[in-house]
Image (cartoon, grey):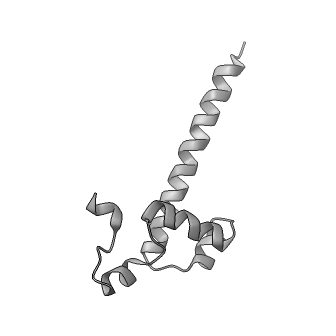
């Protein structure tokens, strides 16, 4: 017999982990120079949602090249 409570808790944890991985990939794609519309399309979400995820993860919505041009670290995640 299946322990449904334990199974559903495992499912929930796995889904949360995959969603965090997805957010990290979205943020990395932006740093690599892709547009929010591209990223949103690839992730099956609105481009504004992709932008908000990038701001939350990267602390900014700019690409690595845009950050470097402004004299800032290209990847804010590597400076911590």
Q: Is residue 31 left or right of residue 76?
A: right
- The picture places residue 30, in percent across and down from the top left corner, at 48, 73
> In the rendered view, does 14 fall on the left or right side of 45?
left
Residue name at image x 48 percent, y 58 percent: 24
Q: Is residue 75 above or below residue 8?
A: below
7 up-or-down from 73: above or below: above
Q: Nearer the viewer, residue 13 or 70?
A: 70
- The image quadrant of residue 39 is bottom right
Q: Is residue 71 left or right of residue 55?
A: left
Image location (x, y in percent) of residue 26: 52, 65
At 63% from the left and 21% from the top, the residue drawn is 6
Between 16 and 69, the residue placed more toward the observer is 69
Q: Residue furthest top?
A: 1
Q: Is residue 17 above or below residue 2?
A: below
The residue that appears at 50% across and 52% down in the rendered structure is 21
Q: Position of residue 40 (x, y in %)?
A: 63, 71
Q: Quadrant of residue 53?
A: bottom right
Number of numbered tags placed on the structure image: 0
68 on left or right of 9: left
Question: Along the line of sight, which residue is nearer the eye, 13 or 62?
Answer: 62
Q: Locate the C terminus by quadrant.
A: bottom left
Examine the image and state in which quarter residue 72 appears: bottom left
For the N terminus, the quadrant is top right
Residue at horizontal 34 percent and vertical 69 percent from the top: 75
**Foreground of the two, 69 or 6:** 69
């Amino acid at each position: 017999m299946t322990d449904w409570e334990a199974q559903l808790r495992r499912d929930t944890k796995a889904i949360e982990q995959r969603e965090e991985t997805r957010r990290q990939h979205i943020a990395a794609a932006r740093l690599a120079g892709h547009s929010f519309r591209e990223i949103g399309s690839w992730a099956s979400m609105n481009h504004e949602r992709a932008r908000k995820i990038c701001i939350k993860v990267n602390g900014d919505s700019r690409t690595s090249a845009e950050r470097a041009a402004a004299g800032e670290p290209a990847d804010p995640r590597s400076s911590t």
